[in-house]
Amino acid sequence: MNGQPSILIVDDDPDIAAIICALLQTRYRTRAVSDGAQALEFALGATPPDLVLLDIMMPGLSGYEVCRRLKADARTRDIPVIFLTALTEAKDEQSGFDVGAVDYVTKPISAPILLARIRNHLALKAAADFLKDKNVYLEEEVARRTREVHAVQDATIMALATLAETRDQETGNHIRRTQAYVRALAKKLQPHPRFAGQLADETIDLLYKSAPLHDIGKVGIPDAILLKPGRLTPAEIAVMNTHAALGRDAIAAAENLIDAPSSFLRLAREIAHHHHEKWDGSGFPERLAGEAIPLSARLMALADVYDALISRRVYKPAFPHEEAVEIIRAGRGSHFDPDIADAFLEIAGEFRAIAGRYADDDDGAGLRP
């Protein structure tokens, strides 16, 4: 019995309501109310009906108004409404359809016609409900699989980045610190007029994910140079500097394997290739200057330099945070985009906190006062 569809009958004439209830009671669960206010209260209750049979001419709220309110509420808009009325003019029927009714049955009511209309509209509603439930399931499944793909992507990125960093024993948590620095800078610059159109939340997430690949090209640098315990010669520096092009080539090769352009891989390629460029054009590998340097690489450039300054190297001690800040201040407009440098100076404390959070075990990431 409880599996039967439920029908709400709304009619101010108790005799008509009783007749309809008697007609339907063997096939459906029925509830009769005598005015529009009661109809809305019941329809919006804990167990809304599967279909509404609605009189038009009633005291208080008319059937048109009741239908209009049902269709305006997300909780009841999908309940089919059939008007039962003595109004027989075409304009009255049109008015019923205009407010969202699915059918219009005139009085005196023909029992076979009413039963056929109810049966058809309940079947249509059941089909619509099935499709809606199916769509919800499919959307949830797509979302779940998308989360899985993103998780695998993130893990793969971190594994590749870590592989590159394990060849350089001195970097420790460098990749985690730098990606956090990049996100902090991007968030700070998000409302800036120069960058607002380029730093949507989605883009910042992609920058965060792609930043760990900035030194992926180091896998192609010979150990004798990459792991040399001391300063490099000019010739060795030239070889070391090729890691930017090697990183670009590796990521570009990955881009060529997919059918559609990838924002993530584009940003990763830009960062890997250009994070050693300088605002004044004196960097490498292409001596780009100013805004010819991709924004992603300009952000990474400052993050990478700050972390190098506060980290111990075989050829230098870890600089205190305050000294690193002053070096970056001095590089404003020469090494770094002036606005990015200004953003860093405003949130330098946040950089210090990030460095402390991901400090290397041996020297606290250069955070000695």
Image (cartoon, rainbow, N blue to C red):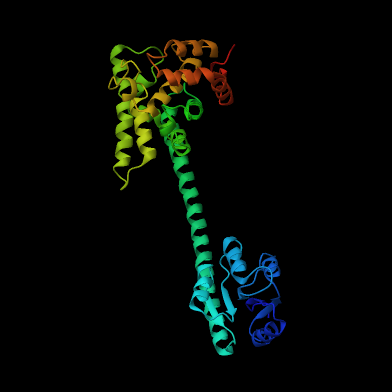
Numbered disc total: 0
- The structure residue drawn at horizontal position 47% and vertical position 40%, both measured from the top left corner, is 154
Q: In the figure, residue 72 lies in which quadrant?
A: bottom right
| Left or right: 238 in relation to 93 | left
Which sits in the foreground, 116 or 60?
60
| Left or right: 152 in relation to 223 | right
Which sits in the foreground, 348 or 191?
191
- The structure residue drawn at horizontal position 42% and vertical position 35%, both measured from the top left corner, is 160
In x, y percent, where is residue 56? 61, 74
Q: In the figure, residue 254 lies in which quadrant?
A: top left
Above or below — where is 156 with respect to 291? below
In x, y percent, where is residue 54? 62, 75
Which sits in the foreground, 40 or 252?
40
In x, y percent, where is residue 237? 32, 16
Above or below — where is 245 with respect to 129? above
Which sits in the foreground, 255 or 97?
97
Residue 88 in view, yes or no:
yes
Q: Quadrant of the C terminus?
A: top right
Q: Quadrant of the N terminus?
A: bottom right
In x, y percent, where is residue 64? 59, 69
| Left or right: 291 in relation to 185 | left
